[in-house]
Amino acid sequence: MSTTTSAPRRSPLGSKDRVKTAVAAAVGTSVENYDFVAFGTASALYFGAVFFPESDPLVGTLLAFATLAVGFVMRPLGGAVGGYLADRFGRKPVLVGAMIVMGGATVLIGLLPTYAQIGATAPVLLVIIRMIQGLAFGAEWGGAITMAYEHAPWHRRGMFAAIPQSGNPLGIALASGMFALSANLEGDWKWRTPFLLSAVLVVVALVVRSRLSESPEFQEAVATGKTEKNPFLATLRNDWRGILRVIALRVVESFAYYSTATYLLNYISERDPEVRPTALGAITAASILAIVVTFLAGSLTDRIGRRPIYIAGCIAAILFAFPMYLMANQGGRGMVIAVFIIGIGLIHAALTGTQGSLLTEQFRTATRTSGASLGYQLAAALGGFAPLIAAALVGAFGWPGASVLYLGAAVIGLVGILVTKETWPRAERERVGALVEAERRR
């Protein structure tokens, strides 16, 4: 255990940097999601033909989605390493380091030669860079969320933890919007431009994050000797149940997004290529709506608890599993827009808005980043295979196969939240509310 002299006093009103920290975490999270989601969008629209052109269209799509999934496989390793470093040495260094690695990998994708230029070496390089992306993205999330959570006022932690979560749809909106704009460019610039422009976003995020102060809760843990020498092993030994809960809770959200924004985008585009710009625009609009819904969901959890919102989101996903493809199959721009608005702007956003606080509160300070990151990224690794599995199921059984996959993930999420205790019950809300009032009167 770490040792030190005196512990700083933490105010129930949070640190003086609480707003700046939450916003900086959100800026970085939006850039990380831009980079990661850009790969998913390019996989759905371009990479099958650019990097796997000798395959037939279905096999090319499967190979592109398999390359997408490789990044998700690496995310648990990134989460384990990033969580260990954040719990051992501090949250801030991990946030800055992950941003540098992620940004560099994304720009390299934009510079990659294609299969037509260097043959089989091109997809090999793509897979390697995708692995690096996965490591960086896995390391980033836990540090961003814990920083916002631990700087926040105690009675508004749901809202503050939802701010970096709002960076997720912001990054998605930026990536989708950029691909919609670059669709009018010639040749490879259609997919290269969004990756290359990531460099500008990375520089902005690095400047913002470099000015953050360290988490006061982590500083207190260091001062009182309550850190762990090996937080990763301590988490596996003492908090494995929390990790399993996080996996179950995260699976529904991960599958809900990638089944919709990645696979459904590909499904609609192949059925009617002329609708592709509308679908990209719909994902962008849905993601903008999700920014607001994510924040509102997190804020609402501070008033009524975390579980009710998550239960509602899981039930909504269950009910939407088959209608989403029925709507997509009907065709028409209105139906395409509606399916993405419901799937991403409402259902997915309600889940992500609740996750910031709900998943973080499954663990104590000393192992918080390690536990939340590991469970979150293990579930993400499963979710990364959603487009690949959905494509295979549709090839075998038609569109109902993809609906059953979505439904199964939603059921897992519902079971997970039903067996998870409320982390912000009424008694605790009232107790903390009294502490906050007393602090305001000081």
Image (spheres, rainbow, N blue to C red):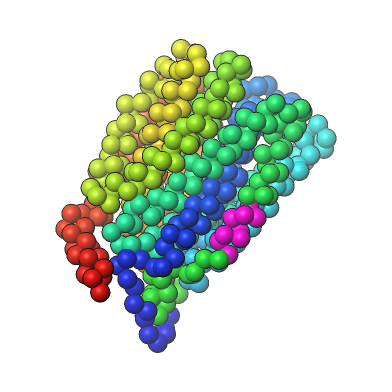
Is residue 265 something that shows in the picture?
no
Does residue 264 sit above or below 106 in this rendering?
above
Does residue 284 sit above or below 357 in this rendering?
above
Image quarter for residue 190?
top right
The C terminus: image quadrant:
bottom left
Q: Residue furthest front?
A: 441
Residue 282 is situated, as x and y percent measured from the top left of the image, at 51, 27
Is residue 268 something that shows in the picture?
yes
Confirm whether the magenta stretch covers residue 140: no
Q: Residue at x 83, y 35 (%)?
A: 117
Q: Nearer the viewer, residue 49 or 92?
A: 92
Q: Nearer the viewer, residue 61 or 287?
A: 287
Q: Residue furthest bottom?
A: 5
Q: Nearer the viewer, residue 319 or 29?
A: 29
Residue 438 is situated, as x and y percent measured from the top left of the image, at 21, 70
Residue 407 is situated, as x and y percent measured from the top left of the image, at 36, 29
Q: Which residues are magenta?
A: 202-210
Q: Residue at x 48, y 20 (%)?
A: 336
Q: Residue at x 48, y 36 (%)?
A: 287
- Locate residue 397 relative to residue 131 in the image: left or right: left
Residue 413 is situated, as x and y percent measured from the top left of the image, at 33, 40
Confirm whether the magenta stretch covers residue 208: yes
- Locate residue 190 relative to residue 29 in the image: left or right: right
Q: Residue at x 25, y 55 (%)?
A: 424
